[in-house]
Amino acid sequence: DAGVTQSPTHLIKTRGQQVTLRCSPKSGHDTVSWYQQALGQGPQFIFQYYEEEERQRGNFPDRFSGHQFPNYSSELNVNALLLGDSALYLCASSSGGGFGADTQYFGPGTRLTVL
Amino acid sequence: DQQVKQNSPSLSVQEGRISILNCDYTNSMFDYFLWYKKYPAEGPTFLISISSIKDKNEDGRFTVFLNKSAKHLSLHIVPSQPGDSAVYFCAAPSGTSYGKLTFGQGTILTVHP
């Protein structure tokens, strides 16, 4: 049973560019959350997708957007990249119905470097 | 506004001894807490949780203690093993279906053989 998968593993972009990160949830999960982990910090919640809609959002600007597909996979898009967007981007999946806090399964992340 | 704080960036202990990792929170609305463990090149994995109606939860070598009046929780690992060496995060869920996790900064635990 494949867990949460993310692609690509690493990515290098330059300031001002746009980037798309991808996530496939664990089998049986229908909810995807995205987190940004800067160096030396804990993950910060970006947003969560459920039933192809953004269900809740953290304190991130509109440059960060996402999408969820009918097969529950998800994309994170970041426009107009800044140096400060360099981070590890983590995707977590869970079941959307009811309480899902301790059943969020994380992928290995995508390391984004902005030059 | 750091609502969940782990003030010790690192902890080093000897194999077989106890490891104690600490976490403080400021948001009194938090009523559930989780600990995650993260190895390099892997995502965080859930370790243990505690509800605010309890002050202790135990799972094998791992015990989490919650002091609501002090807004403080701690994770005890007894006995510590070299394979426990990892980054440990405490987190609190909130929002719709408790789907938003607020993490602390993490503590790097090193267990020496």
Image (tube, rainbow, N blue to C red):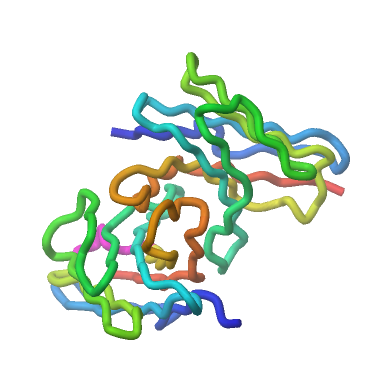
Q: Which of the two residues, B56 or A63, is positioned nearer the viewer here?
A: B56
The N terminus of chain B lies in quadrant = top left
Quarter of the view holding residue A76: bottom left
Q: Is residue B42 left or right of residue B5?
A: right
Compared to residue B90, the image places residue B96 above or below, namely: below
Q: Residue at x 55, y 38 (%)?
A: B9
Q: Residue at x 51, y 64 (%)?
A: A105
Residue B91 x, y percent position in the rendering: 47, 43
Q: Residue at x 36, y 53 (%)?
A: B99
Instruction: Say whether residue A103 is magenta.
Output: no
Compared to residue A89, the image places residue A60 above or below, namely: above
Compared to residue A28, the image places residue B3 above or below, namely: above
Residue A107 x, y percent position in the rendering: 49, 70
Q: Residue at x 11, y 61 (%)?
A: A62
In the displayed orientation, state which residue is furthest to the top.
B69
Query: What is the count of numbered marks?
Result: 0
Quarter of the view holding residue A61: bottom left
Residue A66 x, y percent position in the rendering: 22, 72
Residue A13 x, y percent position in the rendering: 27, 77
Instruction: Say whether residue A86 is magenta.
Output: yes
Compared to residue A36, the image places residue B53 above or below, namely: above
Quarter of the view holding residue A60: bottom left
Q: Is residue A68 left or right of residue A40?
A: left
Q: Is residue A85 left or right of residue A81?
A: right
Range covered by the magenta-colored residues: A82-87
Q: Which of the two residues, B58 or B19, is positioned nearer the viewer here?
A: B58
